[in-house]
């Protein structure tokens, strides 16, 4: 069951068509910015900033600041480039930590070059994103972006410190994904609505929408990492488990085990020849996939509720459609 | 021979005494800021932001913006905290890449925790520095800091890509240290003079002073990494060589070798039981230490020349004294 309203279910194609002038302008803008990097690292920068990915954060910016009759707003494009660059920086660093080989169907920076270069390139992308943020007329963009970025790092560090902890609670997991994903989704919506000069109450509402959507998206992404196929996702899967990061499906499974079994969980996984197959069987046996999807639905519901009072505003149908797209994406995981 | 003018040689103690209200305010400010980090990473942040190091960049900020009769200028303290946080972030990341164990006589973050945490903590420090930079009345601070930070990363990446390259030229080496060190030294001076509302021509002059001082400092630091003792420096030495980063002393030595010897240089180093002793002997035989110190003197001279026309301005004697302190530091390496 999908909780989103059918009324606003623009197809993925229709939504992309609407966003196309912005997405094209974003590609052009990023290509120009790549040339602002020192000559020594332009090729590297171009490699990891080439058009790819689902562009969820840019879409949230464009549609949170959407005005049907307005010509293309360059500030929204620049803000999208900032967020995309911050997001790519976190991916470059994530891929080192996860020892991942493939991202967007291509070698990760840490595999194509090496981990040293990847650490530094991530830093350079962060710095340039903040440099772009300092080119707005208002200091508000710098404030939003730098705070969100620090929270993302805090979330990632918390997760890293909880590695291998079989007693990690559901609350601790939610706090981690709130920092590491909800924050950037919320900040994207906030930037869009702020730059388009929407009412401050709508800005709060849409930020809240973004946060819940971010949590839903991370719940989907973490489940996908365990049960999806690489041909579906175009990236290395099983990385959370390989690095002993326990996400919601594993936490719910651990809760079903007695103390002894919980402590031997990591060993059991390592001992089984195909830990992924073993784990998926366990998740099905304990009906955990549907429980995670319930948690996903609940966040989608909260997201949509956040902006319900603003249904007469122009961004509303598009934001609802983004929410629906994420539901469609997640539906393939339902058992 | 030291080229700096004796006239302005405030002793290290006298200079520190003058800077004390600012240095104390900096410690207080940073301690307060540590509490702005998410609770999960406060302890880690406090660990790597505890008062330590030579505080060269903060001193450059304080004295580039110095006004004898003015009460303590909080903007200079905040700018110093920004630069110190960026600097610490680069150190945390450097120590992963160099696999260093000791920094300021304590375990590095990557050894005390792990490399994952160190990558992310560096990111969090970068982000928070930029967040602080967004709290000034002027967007100029964000611009200066984010650009300088990206250049530092570019320099580090260039150096990483040149690892193991026995054909690296002196020009390539200078370009690397210009990006990775001169930039932050120059930006520190620029911030200080800008925030104190000095004349734009003095701002340019003092930025130039900082850049040359930065190059001199890096020349000293790279030589120290090869011939100094850990008890003198309080940090792991020999890291450049261990990671096959060839700095000026090695480049000058490589220039003395014929093609065959140059290609076998890395192997010769690895084959010798104590590569450090072997290398120091080679550096002495080819009179390279004094050549590096000549390059150092020449940069100090250029630095001091940059601000000569501003000798009537209040920052002048203090900046000259900082230059002298760096000379004193480097003098122990003269053979």
Image (tube, coloured by chain):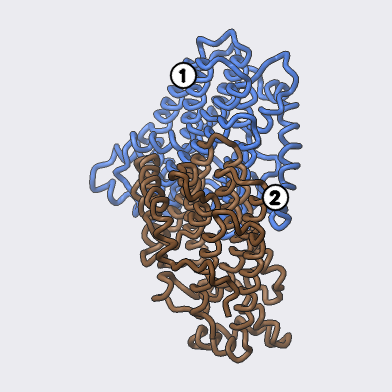
Chain colours: A brown, B blue
Residue found 46% across the figure and 30% down from its top: B215
Horizontal arrangement in the rendering, residue B165 relative to residue A119 (left or right) = left
Tell me which corner region of the image, top left, top right, bottom left or bottom right, holds residue A152. bottom right
| Mark 2 Cα shell of 10 Å, populated few (<14), some (14-19), many (≥20) | many
Reply above or below: A270 against A103: below
Reply above or below: A133 against A237: above
Q: CA distance from mark 1 to mark 2?
A: 42 Å
Residue found 58% across the figure and 45% down from its top: B126
In this rendering, the label closer to the viewer, 1 or 2 = 2
User: Which of the pair A297/B4 is nearer the observer?
Assistant: A297
Residue contact between numbered discs 1 and 2, judged by CB atoms under 8 Å: no
Label 1 lies in what chain? B
Residue found 29% across the figure and 43% down from its top: B167
Q: As drawn, which residue projects farthest toward the left?
A: B259
Reply above or below: B226 against B293: below
Reply above or below: A293 against B237: below
Residue B37: assigned label: 2
| Mark 1 Cα shell of 10 Å, populated few (<14), some (14-19), many (≥20) | many
User: Which of the pair A334/A251 is nearer the observer?
Assistant: A334
**Can residue B1 be seen in the rendering of this structure?**
no
User: Which of the pair B108/B274 is nearer the observer?
Assistant: B108
Label 2 lies in what chain? B
User: Which of the pair B265/B105 is nearer the observer?
Assistant: B105
Q: Pointer 1: what residue?
A: B301
Residue found 37% across the figure and 56% down from its top: A51
Q: Looking at the picture, how far across and down is residue A175, in whole percent? A: 68, 64
Q: Secondary structure at mark 2?
A: loop
Q: Looking at the picture, how far across and down is residue B240, in whole percent? A: 46, 46
> Is label 1 on the same chain as label 2?
yes
Q: Looking at the picture, how far across and down is residue B111, in whole percent? A: 60, 57
Horizontal arrangement in the rendering, residue A320 relative to residue A260 (left or right) = left
């Amino acid at each position: 069951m999908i909780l989103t309203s059918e009324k606003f279910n623009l197809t993925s194609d229709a939504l992309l068509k609407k966003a196309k002038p912005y997405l094209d302008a974003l590609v052009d803008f990023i290509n120009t910015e790549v040339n602002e990097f020192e000559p020594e690292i332009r090729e590297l920068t171009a490699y990891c900033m080439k058009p790819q990915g689902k562009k969820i954060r840019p879409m949230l910016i464009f549609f949170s600041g959407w005005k049907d009759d307005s010509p293309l707003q360059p500030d929204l494009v620049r803000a999208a480039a900032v967020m995309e660059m911050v997001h790519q920086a976190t991916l470059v660093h994530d891929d080192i930590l996860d020892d991942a080989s493939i991202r967007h169907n291509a070698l990760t920076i840490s595999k194509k070059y090496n981990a040293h270069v990847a650490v530094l390139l991530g830093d350079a992308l962060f710095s340039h994103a903040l440099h772009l943020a300092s080119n707005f007329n208002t200091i508000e963009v710098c404030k939003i972006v730098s705070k969100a970025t620090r929270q993302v790092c805090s979330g990632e560090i918390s997760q890293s410190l909880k590695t291998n902890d079989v007693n990690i609670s559901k609350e601790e997991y939610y706090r981690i994904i709130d920092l590491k994903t909800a924050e950037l989704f919320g900040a994207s919506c906030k930037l869009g609505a702020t730059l388009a000069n929407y009412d401050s109450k709508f800005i709060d509402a849409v930020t809240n929408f973004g946060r819940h959507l971010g949590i839903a998206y991370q719940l989907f992404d973490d489940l996908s990492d365990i049960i999806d196929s690489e041909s579906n996702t175009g990236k290395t899967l099983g990385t959370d488990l390989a690095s002993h990061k326990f996400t919601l499906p594993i936490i719910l499974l651990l809760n079903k085990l007695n103390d002894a079994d919980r402590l031997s969980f990591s060993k059991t996984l390592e001992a089984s020849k195909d830990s992924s197959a073993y784990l998926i069987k366990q998740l099905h046996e304990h009906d955990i996939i549907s429980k995670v999807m319930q948690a996903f639905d609940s966040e989608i519901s909260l997201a949509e509720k956040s902006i319900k009072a603003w249904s007469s505003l122009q961004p509303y149908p598009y934001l609802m459609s983004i929410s629906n797209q994420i539901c469609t994406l997640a539906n393939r995981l339902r058992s």
